[in-house]
Image (cartoon, rainbow, N blue to C red):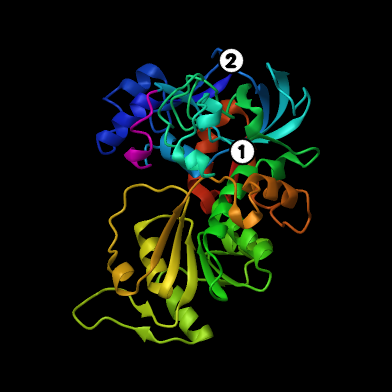
Amino acid sequence: MRAVIADTALHRYALATAGRLLPRGMGRRTGWGPGGVVRLERDLPVPTLPAADGWVRIAPELAGVCGSDLGIALAKDSPRLSAFWTSPRQVLGHEVVGVVTETGRGVRNLREGDRVVIDPVIACAQRGFEDLCRQCAQGHPGTCLRFDQPGTLGCVSPGTGFDLTVGGGWSESLVTHESLAYAVADIPARRAVLAEPAAISLHAALRWQRTGDRVVVIGPGTVGLLVTAALRLLHPDLDIAVVAPGDFGGTRAMEVGASRLLPAGNAAIETLAETDGGRLVRPRPPMQQQVILEQGVDAVFDCVGARSTIDLGMRMLRPTGMLVLVGAAGVQLVDWSLVWARQLTIQGTINSGPEPALGGRTAFSQVIEWLAEPGYRIDGIVTHEFALEQFRTALTTAAAGPAAAAVKVTFRP
């Protein structure tokens, strides 16, 4: 089958050598790229359908390019995120809508021809461990303690899109467990492919138990827009300001439910002070630190994860506010002193799962209901589709973001 794969060993080498992606000439000899670790294979063996109960084969219909995929392809993510994977290569793509083409032993809830989206996280239950780890037993499969243990499955990575055993969405075939596949009926592919990042975004929005009326979302990319959309549906009266420099991201932020837009950097804090009140605390010379907003907002959802955005989020929060760091990021050098001084809560979040705030239902279940409703205004998020053979152009477009008028870039295998 055709598949876009990454050489995980070369990826780790690139990270460990501080950006020297490959030994001189290796990229030309092997055909890997961009970033030296990704290429198209045309004759990759299809993943074997596991012999255990409950497994199905999926033909991807549409598969998204995630920021973590770019982190692997361009060797820019944190080395801690991939240092413990033992698989030498991986089929990329964990945001998938596809069609069931084969059902294995003991499958009860799916039939061939069903359209599904996939929760990519493979935890204890899917690995065949009868004794669930503490995290899985408590309803947190996204933080499974056995992600590096193959169990009976043989998968030694977090799940779909990170291994050859089960495969990934940037291919013509993958396998998944029926417990991780959610039927989407006739939801259009351009909406359904957003189910996985939408579930992550809902999970992030639910980390904040509402303590006020004003929040800020930093970043008008896919996750930032989906966090905004989730907050709007959860809290119809909430004031949601989105830091979205430029018309491209700002227009989409307003479409999905933002109340207003803010410029980047210090100007965001100054704008909040002008519109909402609040005193600006400025550093005394010769100090050059940025201003702090007293009477700041109740929560900030940072969907960028850069040093500058983390710092900005802490400076616009009121004392005892919450900074939610959504998704994944690389290594950052940040001055965390405001966490102590203002008693802030820092909440990291990635993946999703059963949500106590939803009565134990999964975030996937909820967002699939939203995807079927026109009031979930996310139709402008998918901006590009590419064939697998166009993977270099696709990754370049996704990395360029607004400069290429791109939000969510996808493959149509």
Type of the residue with mark 2: Val
337, above or below 381, in the image: below
The front one of 32 and 95 is: 95
Pick the residue in front: 134 or 94. 134
In the rendered image, which quarter is residue 1 located in? top right
Q: Which residue is mark 2?
A: 46
Residue under the image location 32 percent in, 21 percent down: 26
From the viewer's perspective, is residue 310 above or below residue 182?
below
How would you classify the magenta stretch by its main secondary structure?
A: loop
- Residue 410, numbered label: 1
Residue 269 on the magenta segment: no
Residue under the point 66% across and 48% down: 361
Task: Residue lying at the far right in this picture: please name it.
Answer: 186
Residue 29 seen in the current view: yes
Q: Which residues are magenta?
A: 77-86
From mark 1 to mark 2, how far is it between C-alphas? 21 Å
Q: Residue at x 27, y 64 (%)?
A: 335
Comparing 292 with 274, the one in front is 292
> Measured from the top left, where is residue 57 in percent x and y?
66, 21
Judged left or right of residue 202, residue 81 is left
Secondary-structure class at tag 1: strand
Q: Determine crowd level at label 1: few under 14, some 14-19, many 20+ residues with C-alpha closer than 10 A.
A: many
Q: Residue 83 lies in magenta, yes or no?
A: yes
Identity of the residue drawn at 29% across and 64% down = 336
| Rendered image quadrant of residue 99 | top right
Residue 53 x, y percent position in the rendering: 64, 20
Image spot of residue 342 (x, y percent): 34, 74
Q: Quadrant of residue 180?
A: top right
What is the three-letter code of the residue carrying label 1?
Answer: Thr
For mark 2, does the 10 Å Cα neighbourhood hold few (<14), some (14 to 19), or many (20 or more) residues?
some
**91 shown above or below 279:** above
